[in-house]
Image (tube, rainbow, N blue to C red):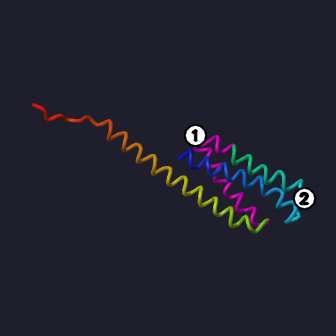
Amino acid sequence: MRSLASIVLGFEALLLALVTPVMISVADVRPAVALPVCLGLALLAILSAGMLRNRTGYILGSAVQVGAVGLGFVVPVMFLLGLAFAAFWVAAIVLGRRIEEVKKAQQVGSAAPTTSTES
């Protein structure tokens, strides 16, 4: 689960960093506002990817998703991109849990003792 979630957050950090010049040039947001907001979200995405060993990383990652969708109020295309990454985030968590369950089942199955019928 961690690897999928960290991939999503890594790509999202890149996206959020690239949105900064778009906010400044297209949306006419002052650099003093755009830089801390976008780069702050990008940094939060990177930090949360590093913290995915415990629940805090997933909570911060979810906060990044909310922030990315919220940027759509300034740059409308971010509604689409934010929702897409939020969907990737949910998919990474759901699929990651399923993969972990299958791995556990395989480990339990392979650790079971085998009986021999040799006489």
Callout 2, which amino acid?
Arg
**What secondary structure do most residues of the magenta stretch adopt?**
helix
Contact check, label 1 and label 2, Cβ < 8 Å: no
Residue drawn where x is 32% and y is 35% of the image = 111
Asked if residue 56 is among those painted magenta in the image, a careful observer would answer yes
Residue drawn where x is 77% and y is 49% of the image = 40
Q: Residue furthest front?
A: 118
Within 10 Å of disc 1 (Cα), the crowding (few <14, some 14-19, many 20+) is: few
What percent of the width, then of the height, locates residue 113?
A: 26, 34
> Which sits earlier in the primary sequence, circle 1 or circle 2?
2
Q: Which residues are magenta?
A: 47-74
Vertical placement of residue 82 versus 119, above or below: below
Choose top left, top right, bottom left or bottom right for residue 48: top right
Q: Residue furthest top?
A: 119
Residue drawn where x is 57% and y is 41% of the image = 54
Q: Element type at marker 1?
A: loop
For the C terminus, the quadrant is top left
Vertical placement of residue 23 versus 13, above or below: below
Closer to us: 37 or 23: 23
Within 10 Å of disc 2 (Cα), the crowding (few <14, some 14-19, many 20+) is: few
Marking on residue 53: 1
Q: Element type at marker 2?
A: loop
Q: Residue furthest left?
A: 119
Callout 1, which amino acid?
Arg
Q: As drawn, is 100 to the left or to the right of 62?
A: left
Marking on residue 30: 2
Asked if residue 67 is among those painted magenta in the image, a careful observer would answer yes
What percent of the width, then of the height, locates residue 102?
A: 40, 48
What percent of the width, then of the height, locates residue 70?
A: 73, 62
Q: As drawn, is 92 to the left or to the right of 107?
A: right
Residue drawn where x is 75% and y is 62% of the image = 71
